[in-house]
Image (tube, rainbow, N blue to C red):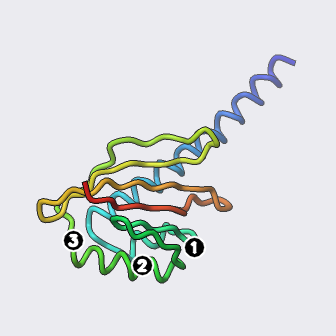
């Protein structure tokens, strides 16, 4: 009976680790895509529809439309640097990350919320707010 308990505990820890690893991997991939100013790479991690806030303009876009919005944003605000300053999960368990994007001396606070979609984690909300 004890061995069954340990096997169950081991299996649960593997599931938790793989979910945590997949979340971290998604955040790392998005971080690298933002750092390089690649709208195409960022959009690979968008949900089918994504809420995008740039400064105070809040819109819901399809994945393809959001890619063009970010292409324009990166063109007008090429990245100097991007770092993740905090990441965690909401009370409801949704992972999120907060970052700092610097372009031409301007600083943007970046916030993204990620949700599980099958075996993947996808961004369903992302904001770039000028500080």
| Cα–Cα gap, marks 3 and 2 | 15 Å
Q: State the residue position of label 1.
A: 49
N-terminal label among 1 and 2 = 1
Query: Measured along the vertical axis of the image, is residue 67 above or below residue 130?
Result: below
Q: Residue at the location (49% across, 82% down)?
A: 64
> Badge 2: how crowded within 10 Å, few (<14), some, or many (20+)?
many
Q: Name the residue under label 3.
A: 77
The furthest residue to the left: 105
Name the element at disc 2: helix
Real-space Cα distance between discs 1 and 2?
11 Å
First reached walking from the N terminus: tag 3 or tag 1: 1
Label 3 or label 2, whichever lies nearer to me, is 3
Which image quarter is the N terminus in? top right
Q: Residue 67 carries which label?
A: 2
Kindly identify the residue that appears in the image at 46 percent across and 53 percent down. Answer: 25
- Quarter of the image for the C terminus: give it: bottom left
Task: Give how far across and how far down residue 3 sits, in percent.
Answer: 80, 21
């Amino acid at each position: 009976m004890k061995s069954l308990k340990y096997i169950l505990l081991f299996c649960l820890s593997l599931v938790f680790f793989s979910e945590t690893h997949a979340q971290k991997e998604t955040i790392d991939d998005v971080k690298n895509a933002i750092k390089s100013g690649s709208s195409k790479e960022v959009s690979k991690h968008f949900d089918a529809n994504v809420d995008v806030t740039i400064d105070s303009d809040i819109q819901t876009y399809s994945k393809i439309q959001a890619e063009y919005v970010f292409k324009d944003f990166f063109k007008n605000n090429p990245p100097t640097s991007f770092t993740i300053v905090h990441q965690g999960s909401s009370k409801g368990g949704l992972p999120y990350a907060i970052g700092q994007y610097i372009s031409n001396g301007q600083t943007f606070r970046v916030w993204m919320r990620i949700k599980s979609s099958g075996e993947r984690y996808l961004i369903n909300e992302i904001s770039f707010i000028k500080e």
